[in-house]
Each structure stands twice: as structure tokens, then as C-alpha cells.
Amino acid sequence: SLHDALPIYAYRLYKEKGIGKIQETEPMKLGTLIHCLILEPDKFNERYYVFDGETPTTQQMKNFCKLLSEDEDISVAYEKCYSVKSLSKKEVRERAKEKEDKLLPYIKSLKLSKDKVIINTEDLAKATEIVRKYEKANFIKTIAETCGLDKDSLELHSETMIFAKLLEIDIKGKIDLIINDKDGNYVIVDLKTSVNPFYDEFIKSIENYKYDRELAYYRSLLENENRKSNNLKIGRAHV
């Protein structure tokens, strides 16, 4: 069937073309933060380090900050990251000092974060507001009612890792949220964030990024765990 073939297709793309090895963008980082706040809030402090200040916006700035956090000489660090042609040593040091002063809170956070993900207070506030709207929408209750689950026996399983074997290939996937009830009904929830809050744009994102294929993949995983497909529902909702 189609959903049996999807994992093989995805595996082949990953191995042959490197699809899946995607560099995380700033919107993707925000989405990961929101996932943590909603699904695993107890793990926020062990994963994130929060600072109050400006975040580097270019790779050059990030590299410069990293070198300074490793106690590199300020002028040398600047010369490694930026073009210094026609600049005197004094001008290089002045420009480097100006940039250091601007990014000093971030540079300090690199030293103190101990491999945690660094975010600033502005990003945390933005994510917290989105989480507040999610909670206000009573999303879980809406899903339970829409999908016909027994609301008095709901079980929630966040960030669930599922392993399966399809067509002799070992595969795995981490599902954002699985909701089930005492009658053996299951609902797969895949949280997505979008820069555009309007429903029509959200639907376009689903079509453009093929999120339905991702849900089909998760469904394959669960079905191969012997969960009955007629009791397994997938769908989409907008908050």
C-alpha cells in the first residue's frame, strides 16, 4: 500500500540525496522551543539557557562570538570572521570591540550554557505567548470530542519514539503526541508552527510541505505496533 511504501521512499531519499539533513533555521528553532514548552515542559531547564540580549543574525557573527567565548584575541577573532582589507590594526580592534560590546551577553551565555540551546528573553516570550493560546484553545478536549474518544479515560503520550520494521527495513520515528482512550482508540497529533496565523495559510503550509506524508509515516509505525488501523485517526487542527 501507499503508506507502507512511504518509509522506504523516505529512507532512500535520506541515504541517496541527504534529504533530512536539514540545517535548523531560526523559525525551526522557535518551533522546537514551543514543542518543548507544550509537550515536555519539565525538560526546559535542562535543554535551554536563557539570556537577555541580542542574538547573532549571521554566521559570521556566530563564529566571532564563538571565538571570543574560547578566549581568542578580539582582533584575531575579527580578522578570522570579517574582511579587514584596507583597515589598520587600530580600526580592526575598534570594530571588533564595537561588535563585542553589542553581543557581550550572548558571548557570556556561550561560556555558561554548557551545551544547552541558547535563547534570548524575546524568543522565550514569543514562544510562551503561543503556548498560552494553545492552552486557552483547550486543544486536547477539542481533539477528543472531534475524534470520538472517551474524554474520561484519555491518556497522553508526548514525544513517543516508535520502532518498526517495514519491508525488512528497520525504521523509527518520534511522534509529538499520541492520545488514546480505554476503548483502544488512538489519535496522532503532530504540532506545527507557522509564521502566518491564518487558517487558509496553515492549510497551504500543509500542502506545500507535505505534512500529510509525515502523518502517514507515523500511522505506518503505529500500525506495525499492532494498533488497529480502524481505531487510529489522523487529522489536522488550527490554533
Image (spheres, rainbow, N blue to C red):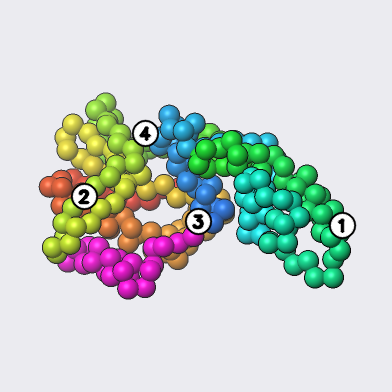
Residue 21: x and y in percent read 41, 62
Q: Which residues are magenta?
A: 1-23
Disc 2 from disc 3: Cα separation? 24 Å
What residue lies at 43% left-to-right and 33% top-to-bottom? Answer: 43
What residue lies at 38% left-to-right and 69% top-to-bottom? Answer: 18
Using residue 150 as the reference point, say whether residue 129 is left or right of it: right
Residue type at mark 1: give it: Lys
Q: Is residue 40 above or below residue 233?
A: above
Say which mark, if any, is on residue 90: 1
The secondary element bearing badge 2 is classed as: strand
Residue type at mark 4: give it: Lys
Residue type at mark 3: give it: Glu
Q: Nearer the viewer, mark 4 or mark 2?
A: 2
Residue ID for mark 4: 141
Q: Nearer the viewer, mark 2 or mark 1?
A: 1
Say which mark, if any, is on residue 24: 3
Which of the two discs, 4 and 3, labels the residue nearer the N terminus?
3
Residue type at mark 2: give it: Phe
The secondary element bearing badge 3 is classed as: loop
Is residue 189 shown to the viewer in this render?
A: no
Tell me whether the residue at label 4 lies in contact with that at label 2, contact meaning CB atoms closer than 8 angstroms.
Answer: no
Q: Residues within 10 Å of mark 2 (few under 14, many from 20)?
A: some
Is residue 74 shown to the viewer in this render?
A: yes
Which of the two discs, 2 and 3, labels the residue nearer the N terminus?
3
Residue placed most toward the observer, 50 or 234: 50
> What secondary structure predominates along the stretch shown in magenta?
helix
Q: Nearer the viewer, mark 1 or mark 3?
A: 1
Q: Locate the N terminus and report the quarter of the image it occupies.
A: bottom left
Residue ID for mark 2: 163
Question: In the image, is residue 181 part of the stretch drawn in magenta?
Answer: no
